[in-house]
Each structure stands twice: as C-alpha cells, then as structure tokens.
Image (tube, rainbow, N blue to C red):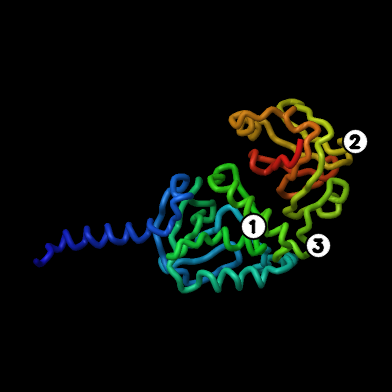
C-alpha cells in the first residue's frame, strides 16, 4: 500500500526520534532530557565538538586538559593533545545523541550536553574512566555528578591518564598556594566553620588570613540548605573540594553547589 506523503513524513519523524532516544542507557534516562542526534564533523578541543548542522556542543560536567586555542600567554595543559585525540577517535564521523541534565545552552550558544554513541557508550564516562578528564560541574547542570565522580575516583586510584602527572595531583591545603589560577582538587580536614554576613567559610588552618579556605556566597548557600546541609556539618570532617584556586586571604576556592565538596570521612 502506498503511504500518503504526510504519513510518510510522520513515520520518518517517529523513526528518527526513536533512533535519537534509544542510545541513552536506562539507568541514566530518567534524569536526562533527550535531545537530537547528529554526526560529529569536528572536534574543536577536548571538551567541544561540532555537529553536521553547524552547532557546537560542550561536553557538560567534565574538564579535559585545555589547549591554548589562540589565547595569548595560555600554556597548554599536560595531556591536552592526547585528550583531544582520544575524543576524536571516539566520536569523529559518528552519530551522537545529545541528552540534557540541566541548562541546555551556554552564553556562546553551545549546547551543554551529555553525549551517547549508538552502542550506548556515554562519552563523558569514557573520558573520565581513562583519566583524560576531571569532573567539573555547574549549579545548573548536576544531574549525573555522582556517577561521574565515581568514574573519576576509580581512574585516579588506578593511576590512569591525568592522574599519573604532578600537574593534576590532589593537593593538600598547605600546598595549594603554589597552584593558584588553576582548576584543582584539594583534600584536607575542615578545622573551623563560620558564617559571616551571609557568607559561609570552611577554614583548613589556624589563620584564615593566610590558610586555605572554602567560601560559599549567600546566594549559593541556599543549595546546601535545600540538600539539608548545615555549615557545621563540615567541621572536623575530611573533605575533597574542587574548583578554581584563587588568592583571597590565602588560597581559596569559591564553591557554588554541594557536589563540589565530597565528604571523605567523619
């Protein structure tokens, strides 16, 4: 029987949608909004790809080693070339399906997406478990952070990729001042906690003016409250925090959501 034109079009759309959504594993699908599919025509850098429709996609939730990309004075991070090549080998010329766990587009009009290959491979997972990326989450995109942290932890324990190099070593609070202006992981025990004029501070040393500190702005603390977290819950606990190290009354990381702080022990 010959299909009418409009029926043919609808059938094609339904088939396309089924194909686009089928690659997302069931264990993750309930926390993701399915998006479209496309062929990867370019790997822009180790965090960004371009599809055959011209749209760029930022691999949300991870931070791979950065390339200069023409930025004056920017030093290439170790393993940046290897990370880009690994991503190219995985996705270039292949169909990927986008899925969203929060904010869908950034200020550069790039999609912020998790990527899945036709066989169900989650691209972010593969980069994390090979040690060629670290978890890098944002307040508006946290759906799969717990899973990603688990893959990163296993890669670090196995000494894969980034985790073989001093540049990416997990820092102790006393050594953090030597690594300013970097995205870093710092691990130590919270000595004191305080809330001053709405700001929350987790101090790791005796002198908050010079020692490492975690700072949480009033507008961000509400996310901790929503998760049932009190600032006093961190006192005396060994934690690992991730973020950009800045100098402000000593080395400091500004934290914007609870997933940036992992509690490691009582």
Please, what secondary structure does the residue beneath circle 3 have?
Answer: helix
- Who is closer to the viewer here, 223 or 53? 223
Q: Specify whether residue 60 is in view.
A: yes
Query: For mark 2, does the 10 Å Cα neighbourhood hold few (<14), some (14 to 19), or many (20 or more) residues?
Result: few
Please, what secondary structure does the residue beneath circle 1 have?
Answer: strand
- Residue 149 position (above or below residue 69): above
Q: Position of residue 61 (x, y in %)?
A: 59, 52
Question: Which dot marks residue 148?
Answer: none
Residue matched to label 3 = 166
Residue at the spot 27% in from the left edge and 57% down from the top edge: 14
**Alpha carbon of mark 3 to alpha carbon of mark 2: how far?**
27 Å
Query: Closer to the observer: label 3 or label 2?
Result: 3
Residue matched to label 2 = 207
Query: For mark 3, does the 10 Å Cα neighbourhood hold few (<14), some (14 to 19), or many (20 or more) residues?
Result: few
Question: Which dot marks residue 63?
Answer: 1
Q: Position of residue 13 (x, y in %)?
A: 27, 59
Q: Position of residue 242 (x, y in %)?
A: 71, 48
Quadrant of image for the N terminus: bottom left
């Amino acid at each position: 029987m010959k299909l009418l034109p409009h029926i043919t079009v609808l059938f094609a759309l339904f088939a396309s949608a089924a194909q686009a959504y089928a690659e997302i594993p069931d264990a993750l699908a309930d926390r993701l909004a399915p998006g479209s599919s496309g062929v990867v025509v370019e790997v822009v850098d180790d965090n960004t790809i371009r599809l055959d429709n011209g749209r760029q996609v930022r691999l949300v939730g991870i931070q791979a080693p950065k390339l200069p990309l023409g930025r004056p004075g920017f030093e290439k991070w170790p393993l940046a070339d290897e990370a880009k090549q690994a991503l190219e080998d995985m996705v270039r010329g292949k169909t990927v399906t986008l899925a969203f766990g929060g904010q869908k587009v950034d200020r550069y009009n790039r999609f912020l997406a998790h990527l899945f290959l036709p066989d169900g491979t989650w691209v972010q997972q593969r980069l994390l478990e090979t040690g060629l990326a670290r978890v890098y989450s944002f307040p508006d995109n946290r759906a799969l952070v717990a899973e990603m942290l688990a893959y990163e932890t296993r890669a670090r324990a196995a000494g894969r990729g980034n985790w073989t190099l001093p540049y990416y070593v997990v820092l102790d609070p006393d050594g953090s001042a030597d690594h300013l202006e970097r995205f870093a992981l710092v691990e130590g025990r919270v000595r004191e906690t305080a809330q001053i004029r709405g700001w929350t501070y987790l101090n790791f040393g005796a002198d908050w003016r010079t020692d490492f500190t975690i700072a949480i702005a009033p507008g961000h603390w509400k996310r901790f409250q929503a998760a049932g977290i009190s600032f006093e819950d961190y006192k005396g606990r060994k934690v690992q925090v991730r973020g950009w190290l800045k100098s402000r009354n000593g080395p400091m990381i500004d934290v914007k959501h609870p997933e940036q702080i992992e509690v490691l022990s009582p």
